[in-house]
Amino acid sequence: MSDDKALTKRSEDFSAWYNEVVLRAELADYSPVRGSMVIRPYGYALWERMQRALDDMFKETGHQNAYFPLFIPLSFIAREAEHVEGFAKEMALVTHTRLIQNEKGELVVDPESKLEEPLVVRPTSETIIYDAFSKWVQSYRDLPLLINQWANVVRWEMRTRLFLRTAEFLWQEGHTAHASEAEAEEEARRMLGVYRDFQDNWLALGVVTGTKTPAEKFPGADRTYALEALMQDNRSLQSGTSHMLGQNFAKQFNLKFQSETGTEEYAWNTSWGVSTRLIGGMILTHGDDNGLVMPPRLAPIQVVIVPIFRKEEERALVLEKADHVAAHLRQNGVRVHIDARENMKPGSKYYEWERKGVPMRIEIGPKDVASQQLMLVMRQEIGDIPRKESVPEANALSIIARRLDDFQRALLEAAITRREKNSHRGITDYAKLRELVEADAGFIYAGWCGGADCEAKVKEDTKATIRCLPFEEFRSPEAPKQCVVCGKPAAHEAIWARAY
Ligand SMILES: [Zn+2]
């Protein structure tokens, strides 16, 4: 377990650093199937914390959980033309159901077991869910229908990265049906707001929100709203999306209802999702050269207590104090772990818990017991929070609670400060845009005429895409006048960046 070897520095090789953090913090591991990932208990505990917070938010906004099948008939996916085109290249299919032994005794697919219709392993569940909705909805009284499911999905990706892009990943997908376009639009925006609240106030990502261009929207949606976060290497991470699906799926799946005036109408749908990719976003936003840094609200362990003693007679005294402090903190809702492992130096324990991103460590030695003090050490120097301080045990609880709150806030502030420092506004010259993109300078704000060819040209020249057309509060004080590519009048301000 003890592994004091330093991580690769971010400045040396950001990508290697990321992989080492994931593996050595024991969040995840590679699996025998390329592109698949094992989520280890510490990583899964983090995902459970995220699930719980989001699930509460979904329920507070009126949604219920349900579960729909993993397998989707191929004909379902094929019904919505844009949808099938968008997912065609990354589908896993079940075509047979049985193995047999051949003459050599090898296991082979039994050709007799071929399915009449192949089944798609869900890449997303719009089709199968709206098919079910069409049976449940008859009248306007059945609307709105507000459903969420927690599930795994499969998208056969060729280039994968732990948490950021995996062939199978865990997520939630919300699916709703409404009687009017206005209600569906409101829902799509509301859930984007829920995501923003979670991503800023829990994950401390400091996201920008906006609308995707037609080229970047979800296949089958009328409009896609997205959250984009700027990672430490100045690449953008799409950290969540919310789609206004219009009546596209309702028409294909006969999702109709009788309106108040007795007419028969198609429902309006939304869908929205976030995934285990958020864990990658957390690492890339907050991690440092010592490893992970967890926002306290999500950290499975908020405080680790390391008892320190040399002599046997100190042992019981120190451990008893550690138990006492831990019990008191737990009673008050703090998630505490005591690292009482024998035969391991305190220094090695410090490294390990730093690497795992635990926000605070408490060191308790014989002198601390005698003076009734506790030594608090924060995971990282940030804001104006003392990195290390000795506090009286009597007021430790309130100090610890305050430090954790301050740490949470400071992480968000740091993320936003870094994002804005690496945001380049008012770019009017195409050569300048290329130069900034090629230097991975961050978010580049510039005018866009709305033309797909201008958008495609930037992508071809630089691999940068329009991350979003930002909502008003993120736009520059002065609206751009011209398209940075063609010079025609600008229809929008766009944010360009290379992305994960
Ligand atoms: Zn243009």
Image: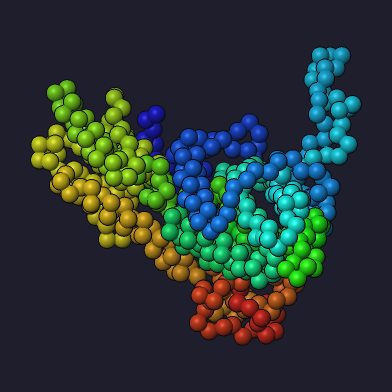
Q: Nearer the viewer, residue 49 or 92?
A: 49
Instruction: Judge by depth and name the residue closer to the eye, 332 or 356.
Output: 332
Q: Work out which quarter of the rendered image holds the N terminus and state it.
A: top left
Q: Position of residue 175 (x, y in %)?
A: 65, 55
* Image side of residue 455 versus residue 231, left or right: right
Is 489 situated above or below 391? Answer: below
Q: In the picture shown, does residue 70 fall above or below 164? A: above
Which of the 4 image quarters holds residue 113? top right
Residue 138 in picture, x, y percent from top left? 75, 57
- Residue 279 at least partly seen: no
Where residue 277 appears, as percent x and y from the top left, is: 56, 49
Colour logic: rainbow
Q: Name the residue rendered at 59%, 47% in the picture.
A: 65
- Indicate left or right for 280 with 304 as reference: right
- The structure residue drawn at horizontal position 79% and vertical position 20%, both measured from the top left corner, is 107
- Residue at the (37%, 41%) spot, across then down: 301
- Say how many tags the image has: 0
Is residue 215 left or right of 112 when viewed as pictured? left
Compared with 284, 322 (above or below) is: above
Residue visible at 49% across and 51% down in the picture = 56
Residue 359 can be seen, yes or no:
yes
Viewer-nearest residue: 389 or 256? 256
Vertical arrangement, residue 407 with respect to residue 4, above or below:
below
Front position in the image: 338 or 13: 338
Q: Position of residue 449 (x, y in %)?
A: 69, 79
The image quadrant where one finds the C terminus is bottom right
Using the rendered view, name the quadrant where residue 105 is placed: top right
